[in-house]
Image (cartoon, coloured by chain):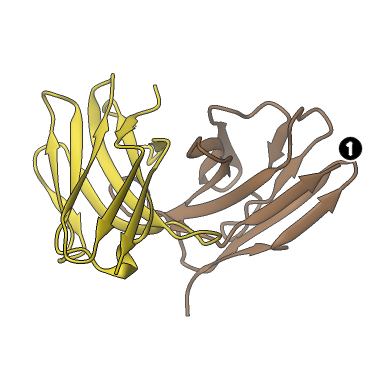
């Protein structure tokens, strides 16, 4: 079955460490997105990519970085510059605009 | 820029109806609706496009008022499975990026 896979489901890190969250899709979608979800704040866009080797900042890109070397993969790195990294991170993919987003099951990151 | 959803929370008995609203301060190109159950990925419900086109599940209905920059999701004869948090995601302007800005969510609880 086609889908979008995020790993790991839970991630724990010490403050000051960079951490990379994985996102892989086999839906052959061109566009991929990273959202951050905090209680009561909905989903906020971190980065998005519409094509391989190109990506754009979302509303809260500071302290994060991404790469899009392959169509299937869109990893997110949470750097030590991110002041409040503990959150639930959701990756999504879609076939450009006017089509549904397909979400992964998320990675819950806890930084202490 | 984030769309505003109302109400923030609603409690229903099985069989009752509910309406969830989504308002934007900017001109809308499209509105997406998703439902998320606790700890799970958001699931696509519907897309409403400028011009009247709709894509989504047959049992879900929604409206899109371009002039008022609003959308409403109608849940009729609610079932226990309707419980969850509903998010609207809005796309603005004429650019076809697929970039969505999500509201803060509306929590729906359906009781037996």
Chain B display color = yellow
Residue located beneath label 1 in the image: A15
User: In which quadrant will I find the C terminus of chain B?
Assistant: bottom left
- Residue B16: percent from the left, percent from the top? 16, 59
Position above or below: B70 against A91: above
Question: Quick one: A14 or A61, which is closer to the camera?
Answer: A14
Question: Quick one: A5 or A53, which is closer to the camera?
Answer: A5
Question: Quick one: B97 or B106, which is closer to the camera?
Answer: B106
Residue farthest to the bottom? A1
Does B31 sit left or right of B87 as displayed? left
**Chain where mark 1 sits:** A
Q: Secondary structure at mark 1?
A: loop
- Residue B110: percent from the left, percent from the top? 31, 61
Chain A display color = brown
What residue is drawn where x is 52% and y is 62%?
B40
Residue A87 location, quadrant: top right
Does B55 sit left or right of B44 as displayed? left
Position above or below: B48 against A70: above
What residue is drawn where x is 56% and y is 62%?
A105
Residue A112 location, quadrant: top right
- Residue B33: percent from the left, percent from the top? 30, 49
Total marks drawn? Answer: 1
What residue is drawn where x is 39% and y is 35%?
B103
- Residue A8: percent from the left, percent from the top? 73, 63
Task: Please say whether residue A67 is visible from this viewpoint.
Answer: no
User: In which quadrant will I find the N terminus of chain B?
Assistant: top left
Q: Residues within 10 Å of mark 1 (few under 14, many from 20)?
A: some
Does B31 sit left or right of A28 as displayed? left
Task: Please say whether residue A105 is visible from this viewpoint.
Answer: yes
Position above or below: B6 against B87: above
């Amino acid at each position: 079955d086609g889908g979008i896979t995020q790993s790991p489901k839970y991630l724990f890190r010490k403050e000051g460490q960079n951490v990379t969250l994985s996102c892989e899709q086999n839906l052959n979608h061109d566009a991929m997105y990273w959202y951050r979800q905090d209680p009561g704040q909905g989903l906020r866009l971190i980065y998005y990519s519409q094509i391989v080797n190109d990506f754009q900042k979302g509303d809260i890109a500071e302290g994060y970085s991404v790469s899009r070397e392959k169509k299937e993969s869109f990893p997110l790195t949470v750097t030590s510059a991110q002041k409040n990294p503990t959150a639930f991170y959701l990756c999504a993919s879609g076939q450009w605009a006017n089509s549904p987003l397909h979400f992964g099951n998320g990675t819950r990151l806890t930084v202490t | 820029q984030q769309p505003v959803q109302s109400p923030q929370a609603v409690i229903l008995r099985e069989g009752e109806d509910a309406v969830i609203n989504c308002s934007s301060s900017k001109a809308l190109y499209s509105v997406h609706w998703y439902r998320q159950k606790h700890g799970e990925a958001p699931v696509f419900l519907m897309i409403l496009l400028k011009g009247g086109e709709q894509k989504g599940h047959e049992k879900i209905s929604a409206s899109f008022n371009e002039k008022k920059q609003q959308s409403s999701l109608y849940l009729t004869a609610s079932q226990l499975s309707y419980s969850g948090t509903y998010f609207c995601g809005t796309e603005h302007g004429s650019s076809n990026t697929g970039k969505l800005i999500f509201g803060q969510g509306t929590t729906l609880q359906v009781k037996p």
